[in-house]
Image: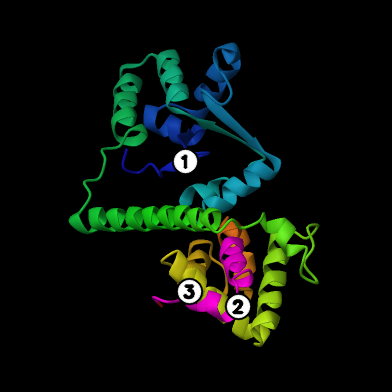
Amino acid sequence: MNDLQVIDYSGVRVLTTEQLAQAYECETTQIQQNFINNKSHFEKGKHYFKLTGDELKVFKASLGDSKISSTLKFTSALMLWTRRGASRHCKMLGTEKAWEMYDNLEENYFNPPQKKMTAAEILSGMAEELVKQERRTARLEMRQERNEENFKILNSRMDTFNGIGTDEDKRQKLNSMIRAFSLKAGMRFDEGWRNFIRAYNTAFHANVNLLITKYMEKNHIQKKKRPTTPEYFERAGLLDDALAVADKLLNGAHAHSAIDSILKHS
C-alpha cells in the first residue's frame, strides 16, 4: 500500500488501472474486462474519469518525473478510478484479498489520517486569517469613507480627466488614474506610482512587492517574467481595491493633501 503514488484529479483522490490491479493483486485485464462487461454500472465523474487529448497531456505534465509518469508516456487514453469506482471493482472481483485491500485503500489512501497541526502551523493559519480580516475591514472602511464624503461613481469621475475613458478596462483605468494623479500633483509618473503603492500598502496593511514575489513563487514565474503591478492586481483579483485607492488619491481636494491623509501612518 505504501508503494502507491498518491494521485488527485480535479480535487478527487484517484487510482490508475495499474495501481488498482496492484492493490487487488489481479491482472489489469481483469479490471478492464469488468468495466467493459458492466459499463452501465459505472458513471463517469462518479466512479471514474477518462482522460484523452489535452486533458491527458495536462495530467501527465502534473505528474512530473514520477514513476507513474514514465509508465504513461505512450498512453493515449487513461482511466482514473475514484473511491466508489474502486469499491465497485472490489465487489466484481469478489476475492478475499480484494475486500481486504479495499478496506486498506479506504482507510489509508482515500481517507488518510489527518496530520496533527503543529503549534507553528496553527499560528500561521491564525495570522493568515487575521490578514484577510484586516483586508475586509479596510475595504469596509474605505467604502464607508467614500459614502460619507459623497464621492461620485468611479467611472463618471474618470470621464472628467483627459485620457481616462469608461471604455478602458480596469487595468488601463488604473494606469490612467495614476498618470492623471501624477500630473495633478506635479510629479513624475514613476513617483506617482510609488506614492500609490505606499497608499495601497497602508490602506490594506499589505506589501505589494512582497505579494508579487510570493505570487511568482507560487506560480513558478521566472524573474524575467515578473508581472507589472497592474498585471498582478488583475491576476490576483485586486483591481477594484487598487482603483479605490487611486480614486482617493486622484479626487481629494488637493492631490498632496490626499496623499498625506492616506499615508499619515506610513
Q: Amino acid at mark 1?
A: Asp
Residue pictured at 26% horizontal, 38% vertical: 113
The residue indicated by pointer 2 is: 255
Front residue (pair 209, 101): 209
Whole-number angstrom distance, CA of label 1 to CA of label 2: 52 Å
Secondary structure beneath disc 2?
helix
The residue indicated by pointer 1 is: 8
Secondary structure beneath disc 1?
strand
Q: Amino acid at mark 2?
A: Ala
Front residue (pair 61, 111): 111
The residue indicated by pointer 3 is: 261
Q: Amino acid at mark 3?
A: Ser
Asked if residue 228 can be seen in this view, the reply is no
Is residue 256 located in the magenta-colored stretch of the structure? Answer: yes
* Count of marks placed on residues: 3
- Image x and y of residue 111, in percent: 33, 33
- Image x and y of residue 174, in percent: 67, 67
Q: Nearer the viewer, mark 3 or mark 1?
A: 3
- Residue that sits furthest to the left in the current view: 119
Residue pictured at 70% horizontal, 82% vertical: 183
For the N terminus, give its image quadrant. Answer: top left
Q: Earlier in the sequence, mark 3 or mark 1?
A: 1
Q: Which residues are magenta?
A: 242-265
Q: Quadrant of residue 50?
A: top right
Q: Nearer the viewer, mark 1 or mark 2?
A: 2
Q: Residues within 10 Å of mark 3 (few under 14, many from 20)?
A: some
Is residue 223 located in the magenta-colored stretch of the structure? Answer: no
Above or below — where is 23 with respect to 201? above
Whole-number angstrom distance, CA of label 3 to CA of label 1: 50 Å
Above or below — where is 178 with respect to 30? below
